[in-house]
């Protein structure tokens, strides 16, 4: 079953005779779960239940355990997303994928890995625009970009367009007028999301980034600034590129469904 399958997909499979009614009922319930060696319980029903893929966080996991979880999820869902991947994780997962015949795509800037059993991303629906204030904010923005793409959105990007040289922003926005939602990542004082929200007519998601230093550094000033914005925007946690990407993709896809 595709990692982003919907109830419509399941019903089409029933009509085509490729799955039984009992199997269809199990899938539609959104409660599919698979246990991996007593170390993980994979939420295989999340795509049907919530419209979002199951994402494996590599941080804190032993490389061998991560590889086992990732392979099982890829086999069950067709595709697998791993975030916050370290070099030790990467080498072990890569070796295991070669053994299993699983395709592996490394998104170095985002520190993410995409595994696939030959299943393609879903058909593109919705446009997500992603901007950063500075170059140091790119890794977090790249998390959002990868997730948005994996959820079937078209992505427009403009990096290093912060308020220190605000003239850079205006030309960047001209190429994003078709965006259904904007993700704006900024560290230090975190001003850029509020400015973008005051210029565009689509929802803006602010992502504070831990690229600042000194008093209220590590993203704290950026978070406070975005929460106090007088222009309207939603704000995710510090460095939460994955959360921003999921939120943005869900908004973009919902808008296109009603266009």
Image (spheres, rainbow, N blue to C red):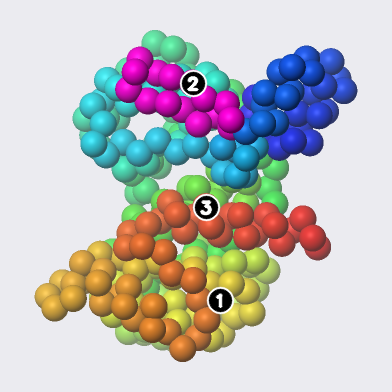
Q: Against 200, is 144 above or below?
A: above
Which of pointers 3 and 1 lies earlier in the amino acid sequence?
A: 1
Point 32% across, 63% down: residue:
238
- Residue assigned mark 1: 173
Q: Is residue 38 magenta?
A: yes
Point 62% across, 33% down: residue:
30
State the image quarter where residue 240 is shown. bottom left
Point 40% across, 18% down: residue:
36
> For residue 246, which numbered disc appears in the image?
3
- Residue assigned mark 2: 34
Describe residue 136's horizontal placement relative to residue 150 as left or right. Answer: left
The residue segment tinted magenta is: 31-45
Describe residue 148's horizontal placement relative to residue 1 as left or right. Answer: left
User: Mark 2 Cα within 10 Å, few/some/many (few <14, many 20+)?
Assistant: some
Describe residue 101's horizontal placement relative to residue 218 as left or right. Answer: right
User: Mark 3 Cα within 10 Å, few/some/many (few <14, many 20+)?
Assistant: many
Which of pointers 1 and 2 lies earlier in the amino acid sequence?
A: 2
Label 1 to label 2: alpha-carbon separation: 44 Å
Label 3 to label 1: alpha-carbon separation: 22 Å
Instruction: Please state the horizontal and vertical placement of residue 88, each as a whole percent of the image.
Output: 21, 30
């Amino acid at each position: 079953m595709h990692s982003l399958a919907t109830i419509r997909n399941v019903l089409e499979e029933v009509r085509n005779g490729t799955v039984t009614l009992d199997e269809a009922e199990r899938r539609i319930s959104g409660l599919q779960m698979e246990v991996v060696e007593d170390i993980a319980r994979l939420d295989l029903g999340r795509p049907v239940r919530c419209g979002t893929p199951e994402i494996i966080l590599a941080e804190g996991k032993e490389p061998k355990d991560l590889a086992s979880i990732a392979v099982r999820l890829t086999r069950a869902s067709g595709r697998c997303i791993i975030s916050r991947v370290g070099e030790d994780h990467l080498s072990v997962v890569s070796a295991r994928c070669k053994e299993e015949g699983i395709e592996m795509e490394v998104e170095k800037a985002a520190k993410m890995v995409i595994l696939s059993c030959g299943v393609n991303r879903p058909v593109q629906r919705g446009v997500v625009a992603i901007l950063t204030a500075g170059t140091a904010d790119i890794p977090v923005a790249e998390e959002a970009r990868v997730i948005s793409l994996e959820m079937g959105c078209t992505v427009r990007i403009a990096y290093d367009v912060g308020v220190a040289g605000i003239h850079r922003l205006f030309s960047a926005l001209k190429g994003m007028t078709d965006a259904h939602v904007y993700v704006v990542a900024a560290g230090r004082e975190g001003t850029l999301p509020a400015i973008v929200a005051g210029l565009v007519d689509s929802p803006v998601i602010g992502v504070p980034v831990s690229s600042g230093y000194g008093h209220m550094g590590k993203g704290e000033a950026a978070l406070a600034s975005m929460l106090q914005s007088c222009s309207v925007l939603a704000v995710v946690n510090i460095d939460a590129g994955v959360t921003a990407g999921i939120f943005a993709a869900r908004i973009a896809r919902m808008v296109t469904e009603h266009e």
